[in-house]
Image (tube, rainbow, N blue to C red):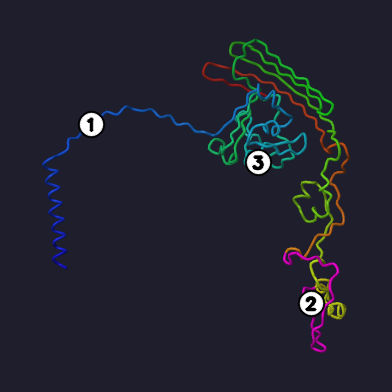
Amino acid sequence: MKKTVYFLMGSTLMYSSSILKAQKLNPEKKVVKDIESVEIQGKTNYNSVNISRKKLDFLQSNTLGETLSKIPGIQNSGYGPNSGAPVIRSISGNRVKILENGTAVNDLSGISPDFNTDIEMNSVQSITVYKNSASVLYGGKAIGGAIDIETNYITRQLPDKKLNITGLLEGGSNSGQKQAFSARGIIAKNWVWAVGGSNHKQDIVRIPGKSKDSRCYDPNLMGFNSILQSLCQVDVDSRRVLNKSLFPYISQFAKDHMIDYELSEDDLYTFSPTYYNPADGKNYPNPKNDLYVPGQDPSKDRYKSEVNGIRDYVETKDGVIPNSHSESNSFYVGTSYIGKSFYAGGAY
């Protein structure tokens, strides 16, 4: 064994030395080649969508959420015709940041979706929607995306004409009335002024039939379903009671000693076909329960909800949507200096 090991090691050394000698006898020549330089430009893809004013003329609705709901991947958390916030791929609230001219919009819509976003849609010039996480650009509250809205309060480019005026007049039997105008002009070289305003009034929205689905008043569905109660905006008077149809037998012992042993209804119903009588030490059959319904789960169906009444938070009326009226008005004035390489302005 020792000779074999030494022989293998010796062979290895001899083979290695021969390789080294061969390398010394035939050294490789180093060849230097010039490689053509390549310029690489990085680009971050935030999967953004830009909506111009021309496109908004066809998409614009009363709320920001309803306007953007025409874009794939965006839904509207509609709380009636006058309140709607955008939902980007099922993410909403404080996880979707809304900005106006690059500044965060902090209003009550971030706390509760039944408040409308404080954006005047008639003053919007373009909207950029980031469908992916925009936390790198706008911080942690943009983890679900961001919506940057550019308005015309501060002019960023010199207008083609010295005076530009636009107006809007809309009206409908069930969509309210809207009036809006905007004007901008050149004061002096590189100086631009802007002024505008709007007025919108919406009466009660009329609909055919009832404003709530009939399931909102179904005792079997409402019960203790707090989520459904909140969506239907109803107050349910209910309590948990023993499901008598779950038990196939009635305890005869409990019937005979209900008062003596201060037993409850839970002791009256049983799964056992017999009961033990301690007086004589024998088992006797229990009577069958006429209310028994087979196929129920003893762990899940032991108790059920008993609804005594369902009341609306706000009284509803057939043919109209309650709380669907609104009125809003706005006015702005601004000026800006537009130079060759920068611009500056202010607005109220």
Look at the picture and state if 38 lies above or below 213.
above
**From the viewer's perspective, is 150 left or right of 21?**
right
Numbered disc 3: secondary structure: loop
Q: Nearer the viewer, residue 46 or 298?
A: 298
Alpha carbon of mark 1 to alpha carbon of mark 3: how far? 58 Å
Say which quarter of the image contains residue 160.
Answer: top right
Q: Quadrant of the N terminus?
A: bottom left
The label shown at residue 329 is none
Q: Which of the marked residues, 3 or 2, is nearer the chain's N terminus?
A: 3
Numbered disc 1: secondary structure: loop
Q: Name which residue type carries label 3.
A: Ser
Closer mark to the observer between disc 1 and disc 2? 2
Q: Main secondary structure of the magenta part?
A: loop
Q: Which residue is mark 1?
A: 32
Asked whether 287 falls inside the magenta stretch, the response is yes
Q: Which residues are magenta?
A: 270-299
Instruction: Count the labels in the image.
Output: 3
Q: Name which residue type carries label 2.
A: Pro
Q: Nearer the viewer, residue 244 or 108?
A: 244
Give neighbour class at mark 3: few <14, some 14-19, many 20+ (Cα, 10 Å): many
Give neighbour class at mark 2: few <14, some 14-19, many 20+ (Cα, 10 Å): some
Q: Which residue is mark 3?
A: 92
Are the residues flagged by discs 1 and 2 in contact, CB closer than 8 Å?
no
Say which quarter of the image contains residue 151.
Answer: top right
Say which quarter of the image contains residue 293.
Answer: bottom right
Spot occupied by residue 269 in the image (x, y as percentages of width and height): 81, 72
**Residue shown at 73% from the left, 19% from the top:** 181
**Residue shown at 14% from the left, 39% from the top:** 27
Q: Which residue is mark 2?
A: 273
